[in-house]
Image: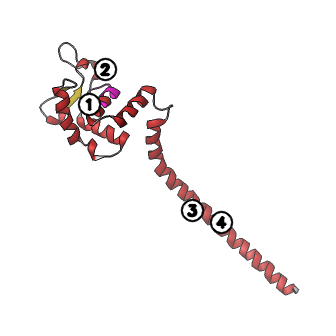
Amino acid sequence: MNLNDRQNTLNGLKQFEKEWMQIERKAKLKLENVRDIIASIESPLSSKLNSLIDPITVDKKEKDLLRKLEKASLSNKFLLTLELHQKFMRTKEISQYLKLKLGNDTKYSTEKLSQKTAGLKKLDKITKIQVGTAKFNSYWGFSSWLDKNGEIIEEYKYEQ
């Protein structure tokens, strides 16, 4: 190999190295973008999963109730949600909670849960408090959360 060929080979290698470094920089930037995208997707998912299983963020009572929720009938899911929150709640709130914790499934719809409240009320498992005249201002809870005058004990008061 003559001197000119060696120089051309060396120049070709330098050019190749320069192009390789540019490709590597671009790849690193794209990788960072992908990591950011994955982190933005994982964040809500992992926080949801952690709220179900992370012993630091969820106390033992809530973890036990969440395990029960997964296995319970829809009526019992309704009751367990009330027990967990320790307050009077609207059917819509219970529906939103179940969808958040157990998945956005139509079986947790407000309509399906409303059907279950009638049966639970007949069995004296829950009691309904109507606030005003609007139908959507109905709150469900346990009769043990009422004082002797039928008023809600303050610690079980619903949030408007």
- For the residue marked with disc 1, what is the amino acid? Met
Say few, some or many: other residues with alpha carbon within 10 Å of mark 2 (under 14 / 14 to 19 / 20 or more).
Answer: few
Q: Which residue is mark 2?
A: 155
Secondary structure category for the residue under label 2: helix
Does label 4 or label 1 sit earlier along the sequence?
4
Marks 3/4: CA–CA distance: 10 Å
Residue 30's tag is: 3
Q: Give, as a single range, the part of the protein colored magenta.
A: 81-87
Considering only vertical position in the picture, is 60 above or below 71? above
Q: Which residue is mark 4?
A: 24
- Residue at 32% x, 25% y is 86
Say few, some or many: other residues with alpha carbon within 10 Å of mark 3 (under 14 / 14 to 19 / 20 or more).
Answer: few
Marks 1/3: CA–CA distance: 47 Å
- Residue at 43% x, 31% y is 63
Instruction: Find residue 18 and report its horizontal and vertical position in percent.
Output: 71, 72
Say few, some or many: other residues with alpha carbon within 10 Å of mark 1 (under 14 / 14 to 19 / 20 or more).
Answer: many
Does label 1 or label 2 sit earlier along the sequence?
1
Name the main secondary structure of what is drawn in magenta.
helix
Closer to the camera in the image, 9 or 120 = 120
Does label 1 or label 3 sit earlier along the sequence?
3
In screen coordinates, is 50 left or right of 84? Answer: right
